[in-house]
Image (cartoon, rainbow, N blue to C red):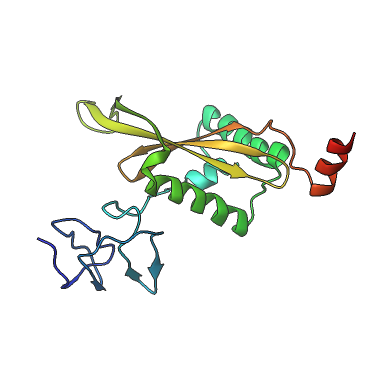
Amino acid sequence: MISNKLYGYKLVYTNEPKVLTGNVSVSPIKWKGKAKIIKGRGSVAKGAGKAEPDFGKKLDYLFGKATGNQHNLERTAGMKSELAKKMGITDTPENREYIMQKIRESYLDNSSISKVEQMSYVAKELPGKPTLNWTGTTRETFIMGPDRGAMLQTLWDDNVLKNIIVRGGKGVKPQTIEEILSQIKK
């Protein structure tokens, strides 16, 4: 049953609202548009029914700041290079916010889903090392840097970002209107 009573923060539009913490008003009307969080209050919007995406430390990974084993160090350096050298996106608060917003928009937009598959891994940290199964959702979004654009491919386990891959970055460099017009005149 839909209700307009006060429920918890991050309340989403469902038939059975989820209660977390804080206060928010809920309308039984489905809204269109972008999800917003304003002064700790959520609004029912596009992507309703989903928890807020959990990025963990994946942006650090993307911008070359991951730590750990050799594989992680090589991947994080490669992604940093892909963003900075090929696209012109360096690690600044503004660029982090831009990337995070593009990933968030992709997460909230079901048309960005390119693949859904059953996945598993061995939980070495648990007693008996059980195999855990989960549903991986791959999403794609295009990002544009000052120099070039590329596809960001993200892998999600529900709302948890598990992996980011930068695809491309070798596209055509953006041109000014003047450059395009000069080529047409030739």
Left of 52 or right of it: where is 16? left
Q: Return the residue nearer the eye: 163 or 131.
A: 163
Q: How many marks?
A: 0
Does residue 66 appear in the picture of this structure?
no
Q: Residue at x 71, y 36 (%)?
A: 86
Left of 180 or right of it: where is 47? left
Above or below, 150 against 36 in this view is: above
Q: Residue at x 51, y 31 (%)?
A: 69
The quadrant in which the N terminus is found is bottom left
Locate residue 59, reporting x and y percent: 52, 47
Specify the farthest residue to the left: 1
The quadrant in which the C terminus is found is top right
Q: Residue at x 30, y 63 (%)?
A: 44
Q: Return the residue nearer the eye: 124 or 173.
A: 173
Locate residue 164, reporting x and y percent: 49, 37
Specify the farthest residue to the front: 185
Q: Return the residue nearer the eye: 184 or 153.
A: 184
Locate residue 109, reporting x and y percent: 39, 46
Quarter of the view holding residue 163: top left
Above or below, 121 against 45 in this view is: above
Specify the farthest residue to the right: 186
Quarter of the view holding residue 26: bottom left
Q: Residue at x 19, y 26 (%)?
A: 128
Does residue 134 appear in the picture of this structure?
yes
Locate residue 31, reporting x and y percent: 31, 61
